[in-house]
Image: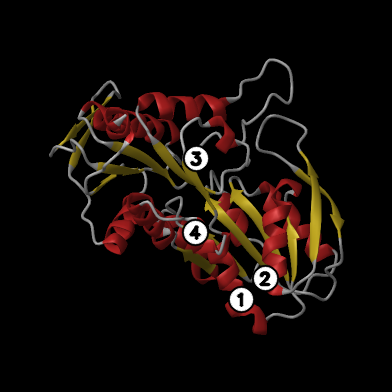
Amino acid sequence: MTRHIHHDLKVYGSIKLYAGTGSPELAQKISDYLGEPLCERDVIEFPNENLFVKLRSSVRGQDVYVIQTTSQPVHRNLMELLIMLQTLRLDSAARVTAVIPYLAYGRSDKKDQPRVPITARLVTDMIEIAGADRYMVIDPHAGQVQGFFSIPGDVLTAYHLITDYFMRQRTQMVEPVVVSVDLGFAKKGRNLAAALDAPMAFIEKRRSTNNATAEALTLIGTVAGKDVILVDDEVDTGGSICEAVNLVKKEGAREVYVAFVHAILSANAAERLASLPIRRIVTTDTVPIPPAKQAILADRLDILSVASLLGEVIRRAHEGRSVGEMFNE
């Protein structure tokens, strides 16, 4: 019996932070928050585009966290994450946690037509097989993604940060109304509306093809003469947001604020947003926004950092303390 208890007892060493090349600035902010340095590693890309990772120090018996977003370049960042996880596992880390601010392929979460993959499930399987014992993700596109993992983890939301931002702006707004760009994102929009003591409206949109194009069809609710906060989980090409902004302005919205967590901003999305009658664009640093795109959006862009959120969850996970307490849960 004593031997059985000993076998099940897990004791982890100190925190070791590793950063991929996908989001170096965010990783450094997390390091600063925790007061723990980023561990040195080499990530080498050979002429044939194969990647090679080498750790510069041992992680045997340590509690290791790999910070890597999987935004563009998606496949390089994803492979880099997988290779780093395997490297840490092979070096006998006691526990390896994949800290993924943005999880790619989140939209491919079900078979909604014949002969298509569920790529989100494939990605979660690869993360586990590569060596992750736990995971952390922020605002995945579909909540069921967490059910694709068979390892424990933390599915976090950055909407607490966005809510705090608009709570500070509340007194300067005229009868704000929260508008969900996607019916699938309505619950988080409702939470924001409740915190602001504001009504809510919805936009029904329909995607008729397998590309990123969507058409905003109908506004359910009233926005005439009111300040509108358009909310979504991510902005990729900007098509849905453009349709939504034009629709609420057509329905008489006064000022329009756009809030989303993941700033993918593919192709000319930044230019499209810049051309819209938007008062403020509020997002986070789960995906690094290149300086050139920040310049296009200029002083209308506010970037909220998720570093303290991830840093505190890492600390609590390491110490075995509740994460739900951070959100009064």
Percent across and percent down for residue 110 are 67, 28
Q: Nearer the viewer, mark 2 or mark 3?
A: 2
In percent of the image, x 31 and y 63: which residue is there?
A: 33
Work out whether mark 2 precedes mark 3 in sequence or the reverse, and give the earlier one.
3
Work out whether mark 1 precedes mark 2 in sequence or the reverse, and give the earlier one.
1
Q: Residue furthest top?
A: 115
The alpha-carbon separation of the residues under discs 4 and 2 comes to 19 Å
At label 3, the amino acid type is Leu
Q: Indicate the secondary structure of the residue bearing disc 1.
A: helix
Percent across and percent down for residue 80 are 33, 32
Front one among 315 and 51: 315
The alpha-carbon separation of the residues under discs 3 and 4 comes to 14 Å
Q: Which mark is residue 285?
A: none
Work out whether mark 3 precedes mark 4 in sequence or the reverse, and give the earlier one.
3
Q: Nearer the viewer, mark 1 or mark 2?
A: 2
Front one among 25 and 94: 94
Percent across and percent down for residue 264 are 52, 47
Q: Is residue 306 left or right of residue 319?
A: right
The residue under label 2 is 195
The residue under label 3 is 103
Tell me the quarter of the image containing the C terminus.
Answer: bottom right
The alpha-carbon separation of the residues under discs 4 and 1 comes to 17 Å
Q: Indicate the secondary structure of the residue bearing disc 2.
A: helix
* Mark 1 in CB contact with mark 2 (< 8 angstroms): yes
Q: Which mark is residue 284?
A: 4
Query: Can you tell which quarter of the image residue 53 is in?
Result: top left
Mark 2 is surrounded, within 10 Å at the Cα level, by few (under 14), some (14 to 19) or many (20 or more) other residues, namely few
The alpha-carbon separation of the residues under discs 2 and 3 comes to 27 Å
The residue under label 1 is 167
